[in-house]
Amino acid sequence: MCAFSLRIYGLICATALLTMVGCRERRVPVAPQGGTVGFSVTISDSLLRCDPDTVIRFGRVHEGEIVEYTLSLRNGYAEPLLILGVSASCGCTAVEFERKPIPAGGDSRFTLRFDSRGMYGRQRKTLDVQTSASPRTYRFYVEADVVE
């Protein structure tokens, strides 16, 4: 009976541990208001392999509000990096970036604007960034919960 109890106890502990490790939520920053730099994204091959989807969350936004978020793009390559273009899935999302090469290891500001006019509920938009370093695009998701 004692061996049976230890086996059950071990099974319960292992199940609890696996549940805690397997259900860990990926933390994604909420965009700060006021245009300050929220976080830095390093553009490199490892971003494409390990984290193909970066989510920028604006959190709760009132309908009609235009919110802005600035992040820093870091060049993780040994050569200068040029942003060739950015395409958004919706006209409600606009991007401003410097159109000059980012030196190896250097940073460049990347400003994103989300216009919530005429929208309600959970919004998820995409931004595809094309660079001179890779034929693949870097995809960013923009999320907001638009309320009245």
Image (spheres, rainbow, N blue to C red):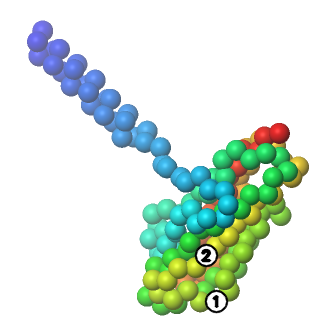
Return the residue found at the far top. Answer: 1
Query: Could you say where residue 55 lies in the image, as x and y percent from the top left?
Result: 59, 56
Residue 38 percent location from the top left of the image:
57, 62
In the rendered image, the vertical position of residue 1 relative to residue 85, given as above or below: above
The quadrant of the picture occupied by the N terminus is: top left
Q: Position of residue 9 (x, y in %)?
A: 22, 20
Dot 1: within a 10 Å radius of its alpha carbon, few (fewer than 14), some, or many (20 or more) residues?
few
Residue at (43% x, 39% y) in the render: 23
Mark 2 residue element: strand
Secondary structure of the residue carrying numbered label 1: loop
Q: Amino acid at mark 1?
A: Lys
Q: Do tag 2 and tag 1 residues touch (Cβ < 8 Å)?
A: no
- Residues 11 and 111: in front is 111
Three-letter code, disc 2: Arg
Say if residue 139 shows up in the picture.
Answer: no
Q: Of the residues tagged 2 and 1, which is closer to the observer? A: 2
Question: What residue is drawn where x is 26% and y is 27%?
Answer: 13
Residue that badge 1 annotates = 100
The residue that mark 2 highlights is 109
Say which residue appears at 32% left-offset and 29% top-offset: 16
